[in-house]
């Protein structure tokens, strides 16, 4: 089985008819995948190599003498570095846009949440008794310093409960600067530097923390300041949101800087008129992946799907343009697009695609460029191949927009419900799709089991989109919840599965659990909470998993990370970290068993807390 | 009957055949579990590199297997064209390993036995062939392999001829 999503199944069949190759086909052709790669015991860090360790017998050291422990730890650290870099560079782009906005260089952007601007500025010690632009300018400059080492620590670390900060201090893993930690990973993993797997992995955790409590959190907070802090909003999810009689534009990627402008441009009277002139009834902007989540959370713009929907959207034959920025954009989409009429428009100087039209996005001329891009999509409407058009009917209603701010005044009620036992705890389901798992199966199945067992589920990223498509982001989904959770959700009028945003918005979950811990005067690791990345595939997910565990959250991975080549590293991650940071990883690809691990963990924590 | 042929010019020396051979001969037959098994699963194929040439060495299942003749305990025998090894009869004398012209038989001194390719009786296509990402290992009939080899030889000649004409 490739997917549990009916719309996806329909389009996978259509792709086959159309002779189009998809990610699942390519995965099949890759079988069996490189055993050394799967186990993490191949090292390409110097040119004495590449070296491999024999997982069964024989060669146990690379040319430099590195053992499986060192090689696996180095490779894992480099994955964390790449993931943290992706999130944090996104965060940097947000800060630079805030600065340009404050300095009047990016005129199409404005400060939307002035109250949040002041709140965040106060944390940074920026004088807030001034105009918004003055505050924004100084705040942006303060945050930019955190990417280097000028300041020496990351401000948002202060948001963690005291006990957690003590753990980090004791281990010496308080993140000092976002770029610094990533650079240090690249240094330490160079030939002949850090050859102690424990020392390497501790720095890996510090780097991951600089993502979760740094780059990602910055991305979230600045996005809210610029575009507004999300509030509950209704919308729809799945490929049925595409419209045969309108110009369909999909924004795909991660940052809201571009997609917000595309959404604005699509409301332009002249462009709507132009769309009508080419025979369309209007312009239909839909999201995909995390930039889609950003638009969904703030504007209620429908979301066409998650990671494994990106090729399928094109197969409908009605997507006039996919506009991409950065991250999780398969190079395959330009190949798939060749069989249909879809125009792939790349916009970031960091992410170009052969056979795509590149229209570089610049914040200084944001709306003007966005309009030019939308115009290209409209002009492409006439090129649709009528015989290839088929849109699946599936689209599900949903409620998204549960920022921390929306939940803040519900924390007391949640704590009461947890103490009473109505709600047993909270589980975060996050992360990607991976064709190694039937699409959405683990996300949806785990969410269903967890809510049935009275565990409130919070979600971001592709996981949230999976559950949106399955109808779990609706108040009516309490039908599937246990009695206690149902009572709790009904009293607050919220769904049992809460959409908290894009992948960088896992920082919202960190803030939420930090506040709960502070109210109870305990550490995050004492709380009846857990996390899972049930279908993860990206390096970003490795960084997320690492900062979740380093923050004290038990984390279940649904696909096997490339570490099993070292028994010591495997043991450290899945057992010994518990004694070090109060949390550990577990690996379980069966959603029923993974949910059970979470339930057992939550019950154990309840017992320790005496509730 | 299909046999495993080696197109050694395509072998990059990645050793993926070695890994999946060991996995197929593990208790769990699953990579992630196999690495934790004791005794460690043993590969029956070895990629050897000499002077830039990589060659995956495994049992050729000879038509007249000298290893069978050399085996004093009756552990080796031919069955349906496959040289089979009965571990329970093996006395660890290494005679078979010594006489095999390809050194394709793997001695496991710790366990006082040899182990060798059994051509994966549970699989349609042997694990090493399935694991090869460059098709350096091919599972086909002898005449098919020879036909392909001859065809390739002639195509090389034709290239040379074109070059001469130019």
Image (cartoon, grey):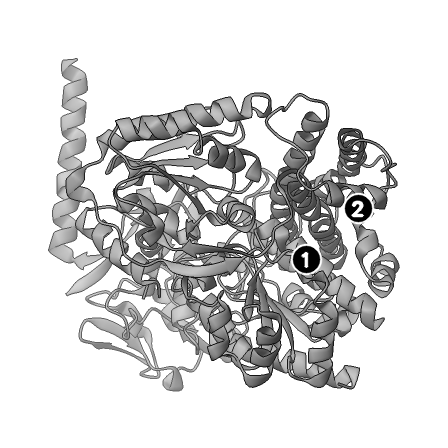
**In this figure, which residue is indicated by the disc labeled 1?**
A404
Mark 1 residue crowding within 10 angstroms, few (<14) / some (14–19) / many (20+): many
Q: Toward which corner of the image does residue A24 lie, by quadrant? A: bottom left
Q: Toward which corner of the image does residue A396 lie, by quadrant? A: bottom left
Front residue of this view, candidates A495 and A100: A495
Q: What label sits on residue A119 in the rendered view?
A: 2
Q: CA distance from mark 1 to mark 2?
A: 14 Å
Task: Determine whether A110 is above or below A23 in the image.
Answer: above
Residue A497: where, in percent of width, then height? 54, 67
Q: Is residue A401 left or right of residue A245?
A: right
Residue A505: where, in percent of width, then height? 62, 52
Residue A129: where, in percent of width, then height? 87, 36
Residue occupying the point 37% across, 30% down: A272
Residue A470: where, in percent of width, then height? 41, 66
Front residue of this view, candidates A82 and A348: A348
Callout 2: residue from which chain?
A: A
Residue occupying the point 31% across, 43% down: A314
Residue A396 visible to an observer of this rendering: yes
Element type at mark 1: helix
Number of marks present in the image shown = 2
Residue occupying the point 27% across, 32% down: A381
On-image quarter of the C terminus of chain B = top left
Task: Determine whether A304 is above or below B156 in the image.
Answer: below
Front residue of this view, candidates A443 and A41: A443
Residue under disc 1 on the same chain as residue under disc 2: yes
Callout 1: residue from which chain?
A: A
Mark closest to the chain's N terminus, 1 or 2: 2
Element type at mark 2: helix
Residue B38 visible to an observer of this rendering: no
Residue occupying the point 64% across, 55% down: A403
């Amino acid at each position: 089985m490739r997917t549990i999503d009916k719309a996806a199944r329909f389009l996978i069949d259509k792709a086959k008819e159309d002779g189009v190759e998809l990610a699942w086909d390519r995965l099949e052709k890759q079988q069996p995948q490189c055993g050394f790669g799967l186990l993490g015991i191949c090292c390409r860090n110097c040119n004495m190599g590449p070296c491999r360790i024999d997982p069964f017998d024989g060669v146990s050291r690379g040319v430099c003498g590195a053992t499986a422990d060192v090689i696996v730890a180095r490779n894992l650290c480099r994955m964390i570095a790449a993931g943290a870099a992706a999130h944090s560079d996104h965060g940097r782009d947000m800060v630079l846009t805030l600065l340009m906005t404050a300095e009047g260089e990016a005129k199409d952007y404005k400060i939307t949440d002035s109250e949040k601007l002041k709140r965040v500025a106060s944390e940074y010690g920026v004088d807030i008794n001034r105009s918004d632009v003055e505050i924004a300018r100084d705040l942006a400059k303060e945050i930019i310093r955190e990417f280097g080492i000028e300041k020496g620590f990351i401000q948002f670390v202060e948001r963690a409960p005291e006990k957690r900060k003590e753990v980090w201090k004791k281990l010496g893993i308080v993140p000092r600067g976002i770029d610094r930690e990533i650079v240090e990973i690249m240094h330490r993993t160079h030939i002949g530097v850090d050859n102690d797997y424990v020392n390497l992995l501790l720095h890996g955790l510090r780097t991951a923390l600089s993502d979760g409590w740094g780059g990602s959190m910055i991305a979230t907070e600045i996005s809210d300041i610029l575009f507004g802090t999300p509030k509950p909003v209704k919308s729809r999810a799945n490929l049925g949101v595409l419209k045969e009689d309108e110009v369909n534009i999909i924004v795909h990627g991660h940052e809201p800087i571009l997609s917000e402008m595309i959404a604005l441009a699509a409301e332009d009277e002249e462009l709507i008129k132009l769309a009508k002139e080419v025979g369309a009834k209007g312009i239909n902007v839909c999201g995909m992946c995390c930039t889609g989540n950003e638009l969904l959370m703030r504007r209620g713009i429908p979301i066409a799907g998650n990671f494994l929907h990106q090729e399928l959207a094109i197969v409908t034959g009605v997507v006039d343009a996919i506009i991409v920025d950065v991250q999780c954009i398969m190079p395959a989409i330009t190949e798939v697009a060749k069989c249909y009429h879809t125009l792939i428009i790349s916009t970031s100087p960091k992410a170009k695609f052969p056979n795509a039209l590149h229209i570089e996005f610049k914040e200084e001329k944001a709306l003007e460029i966005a309009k030019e891009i939308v115009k290209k999509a409209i002009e492409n409407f006439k090129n649709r191949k009528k015989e290839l058009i088929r849109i699946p009917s599936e689209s599900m209603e949903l409620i998204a927009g549960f920022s921390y701010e929306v939940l803040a005044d519900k924390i007391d009620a949640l704590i009461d419900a947890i103490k009473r036992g109505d709600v047993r705890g909270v589980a975060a389901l996050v992360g990607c799709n991976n064709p190694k798992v039937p699409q959405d199966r683990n996300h949806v199945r785990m969410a269903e089991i967890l809510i049935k067992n009275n565990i409130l589920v919070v979600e971001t990223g592709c996981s949230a989109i999976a559950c949106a498509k399955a109808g779990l982001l609706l108040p009516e989904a309490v039908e599937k919840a246990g009695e206690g959770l149902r009572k709790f959700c009904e009293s607050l009028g919220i769904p049992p599965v809460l959409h908290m945003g894009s992948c960088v918005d896992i920082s919202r979950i960190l803030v939420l659990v930090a506040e709960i811990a502070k109210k109870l005067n305990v550490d995050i690791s004492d709380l009846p909470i857990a996390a899972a990345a049930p279908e993860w595939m990206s390096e970003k997910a490795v960084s997320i998993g690492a900062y979740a565990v380093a923050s004290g959250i038990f984390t279940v991975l649904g696909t096997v990370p490339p570490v099993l080549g070292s028994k010591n590293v495997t043991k450290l991650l899945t057992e010994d970290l518990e004694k070090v940071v109060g949390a550990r990883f577990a690996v379980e690809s069966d959603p029923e068993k993974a949910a059970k691990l979470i339930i057992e963990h939550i019950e154990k924590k309840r017992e320790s807390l005496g509730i | 009957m299909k046999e495993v042929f080696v197109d050694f010019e395509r072998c990059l020396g990645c050793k993926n055949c070695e890994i999946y051979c060991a996995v197929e001969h593990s208790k769990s037959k699953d990579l992630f579990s196999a690495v934790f098994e004791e005794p460690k699963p043993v590969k029956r194929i070895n990629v050897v590199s000499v002077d830039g040439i990589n060659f995956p060495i495994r049992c050729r299942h000879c038509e007249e297997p000298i290893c069978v003749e050399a085996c004093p305990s009756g552990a080796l025998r031919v069955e349906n064209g496959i040289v089979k090894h009965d571990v329970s009869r093996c006395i660890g004398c290494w005679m078979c390993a010594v006489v095999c012209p390809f050194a394709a038989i793997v001695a496991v001194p710790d366990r006082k036995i040899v182990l060798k390719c059994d051509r994966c009786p549970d699989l349609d296509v042997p694990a090493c062939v399935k694991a090869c990402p460059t098709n350096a290992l091919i599972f086909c009939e002898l005449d098919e392999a020879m036909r392909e080899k001859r065809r390739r030889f002639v195509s090389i000649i034709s290239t040379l001829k074109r070059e001469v004409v130019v």
